Amino acid sequence: MLIDTMNSSQMAVIYLVTELCCLTAATLSFVFNAYIIYCFWRKKIPAADNLRLALYLAIGDFGYAAAALIHIGYLAINWSNEWLDYNPYIIIISNCFLPANLKIIVVVSCSMALDRCLAIFFPVVYRQLSKSYFANCAMACGYCWFTFDFLFQLLTAPLKRMPNCATMACFVHRTFLLYVSYSNTIAGLLIVVMSVFVFAGIQKISQRKSQIGTQTTTGVKTTSVFRQANRITVGILFCSLFFVTIPSLLVTGYEEVTGISLFAELGPFYICAILVNGFADGLVFVIVNRKSMGSRHRTLSSTGAKNTVAPLRRTSNLDFSHVTPHNPSIVQQHDQY
């Protein structure tokens, strides 16, 4: 796993730079997602039940950041530019939570994309769907995958010292490393496919809205909330594409072509990418909801099922709720439509 073209001192410096970047990104992700969780806990986010997927994503990113601070902190504290020799038991135990926690993030991100696909393409089904139940099922699937990855890594780890290597690729079993690479790649491709559907659906809705227009107060409110829900999902999907999918494809492709692991060359750079993704997820949520977070007026109380779906086409803007059948002039006007 060691690189022959580099001496141990050069590799140690590269590892240290990567670890410092990881610690910076982990701190930012930890703070932002802790703030989001705090706002949900203190009920400072309106319509929190309908944003439960966002809460679960924040929990996943928060857990990943906390685990990374422990794991990367241990690597940085015991760093040496002459000789690296880490305790394999500490490395494995502290690292087990990282690939496992990533599965929660991936599952919840895909669930958010699926939520938007249902809202755009199947609004009737989406209106009848319990948002809390959907989010809880997604989180349950994420925790099942989390448990599998955690036990897989822990039970297959060889637990032997690997001098001059500061990345989990040197300490885990080869089978687990291949599993992580391919499972992350498949999950990343799934995010790409679902993102395409979401982006295409939003574009279609935008074109239809520009042709029809929204002229009633309820329609404006619905369109605004629908747009806001889409912005959160689109922002998170873009973050997943750039910081989860692309690095995963890069790691797998590079190793397939060269036979060399990027982890051994650059250190825990993939962890850094996931941490940046967690920070970006939190930043997107805070920016989109900056006007409502902490507000006592539940301005987003309309983010329920009936208002986060695609706006329906309106064939007429007249209100006939007060028309009586004894007024022939108005009835005749109605028939003309």
Image: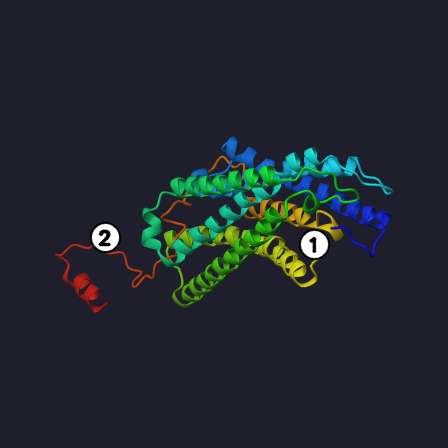
First in sequence: mark 2 or mark 1?
1
In this view of the protein, which residue sits in the foreground, 229 or 21? 21
Question: Badge 1 local density, few (<14 within 10 Å), some, or many (20+)?
Answer: many
User: Is 274 placed left or right of 6 in the picture?
Assistant: left
Residue drawn at x 43%, y 51% as measured from the top left: 115
Amino acid bearing label 1: Ser
Residue 158 coordinates in the image, percent (x, y): 66, 40
Q: Could you tell me residue 154's position as x and y percent?
A: 60, 37
Residue nearer the viewer, 169 or 173: 173
Which residue in the structure is indicated by mark 1? Answer: 261
Q: Residue at x 58, y 37 (%)?
A: 155
Secondary structure beneath label 1: loop
Location of residue 18 with respect to 70 vertically, above or below: below
* Residue 299 visible to an observer of this rendering: no
Pick the front one: 275 or 313 = 275
Q: As displayed, is residue 264 above or below residue 43?
A: below
Taking the spot 87% from the left edge, 42% from the top edge, the residue there is 82
Numbered circles on residues, count: 2
The residue that mark 2 highlights is: 321
Residue 72 position, x and y percent, is 71, 39
Question: How far across and how far down the image is residue 252, in percent?
Answer: 63, 57
Kindly check if marks 2 and 1 are in contact, taking CB atoms under 8 A apart as contact: no
The three-letter code of the residue at mark 2 reads Ser
Quarter of the view holding residue 201: bottom left
Q: Nearer the viewer, mark 2 or mark 1?
A: 1
Q: Which mark is residue 178?
A: none
Residue 237 quadrant: bottom right
Q: Is residue 224 left or right of residue 151?
A: left
Q: Residue furthest left?
A: 326
